Every structure is written in structure tokens, then in C-alpha cells.
Image (cartoon, helix red, strand yellow):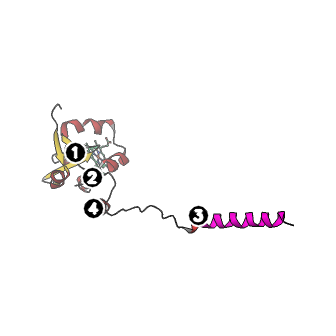
Amino acid sequence: MADMKTITAEEFKQHNSKDSLWVLLHGKVYDVTKFLDEHPGGDEVILAEKGTDATEAFEDVGHSDEARALLPDMQIGVFSGDMKAGASAAATEAMAAGHHVNKPPQTSVISYLLPLAFLGAYLAYRFYLSQQ
Ligand code: HEM
């Protein structure tokens, strides 16, 4: 494992069929093409994760230590890319295009002018009382 290949998102996404299927788990890339037919969970669940980060799906199943022991033999490289786990392609594209998906809340002028107005009214009232 000394010189693991670095795999880009573009390269990773090209291996997205039964003829050649790569899976991304915990930042590592696995060639599962030959394993597909042997997978106890069936080939379809793995194919459903093609071209995306399968870490969450893999962990949600609660794979056994035996399942994890199969991984090192299938590893072909480490993933180097900006594909975020769980982030939808649309959200990632929107961010890349410079659009903020989550806008910061806007502080309106009224939110600090209103307390100031109340303070002013109170002080004026106190002044008025002191003059009686
Ligand atoms: C790529 C590496 C993977 C390996 C080596 C692997 C291996 C295994 C193994 C050995 C089992 C039998 C139960 C166990 O020992 O935990 C299993 C079950 C299962 N796997 Fe995977 N798996 C992989 C990826 C995935 C992915 C990406 C999914 C996506 C959801 C998935 C879904 C399932 C499901 C649903 C079962 C349960 C099958 C059942 O209980 O009927 N696996 N897997």
C-alpha cells in the first residue's frame, strides 16, 4: 500500500457500470467489479452508489468485520477530489458557481432601532417624572 494511486472525481465517475465499477468509502476507492456478483446484499445496492460517496450507505447497513476485511484487497487508490459526502450534485454545482446555498440571515435595521426607540421613550418618561 506504499504507493496508492490518487484518483480524481472525474476518473472515479467514469467507472460507473457493471463492466467497471468503483466504489468510494471513507476517502478510499475500491474496484468492486468482480465482487458485485458475490455481494450478499446484491449488486443493485452497490450500483445505486455509482459515481458518489457510498460511505453513508455502507455504514448504514452496519457491515460486519468480515465485510470490512474484504476491502483492502479491492482498494485501488485514494480519492482526491472535492466530492462531499451527502452533498447533492446540484448543491455542489451551485456552490462551485458561487451561489450560496445557505444564505446568512439578514439583520434588518428595525431589529436594533426598535429597542433604541423604547430606551429613548423610557428615558424621556423618567425625565418627565423627575420634573413633577
Ligand atoms: C464495496 C464494498 C462492500 C463490501 C465488501 C460488502 C460486503 C458485504 C458483506 C460481506 C455482506 C454480508 C453481511 C456482512 O458481513 O455484513 C454485505 C451485506 C449487505 N450489503 Fe454490502 N458490501 C459492500 C458495499 C455495500 C454498499 C455500497 C451497499 C449499499 C447500500 C451495501 C449494502 C448491503 C446490504 C443491504 C447488505 C445486507 C444484505 C442482507 O442482509 O440481506 N453493501 N455486504
Using the image as rendered, state which of residue 88 and residue 37 is in the foreground: 88
Q: Nearer the viewer, mark 1 or mark 3?
A: 3
Q: Which mark is residue 112?
A: 3
Q: Nearer the viewer, mark 3 or mark 4?
A: 3
| Callouts 1 and 3 close, C-beta under 8 Å | no
Q: CA distance from mark 4 to mark 2?
A: 10 Å
Q: Nearer the viewer, mark 3 or mark 2?
A: 3
Left or right of 109 in this view: 85: left
Magenta residues span: 112-132
Residue at mark 1: 79
Locate the C terminus and report the quarter of the image it occupies: bottom right
Q: Residue at x 60, y 66 (%)?
A: 113
Using the image as rendered, state which of residue 18 and residue 121 is in the foreground: 121
Residue at mark 4: 93
Q: Hey, what amino acid is under mark 1?
A: Phe
Of helix, strand and loop, which one carries label 1? strand
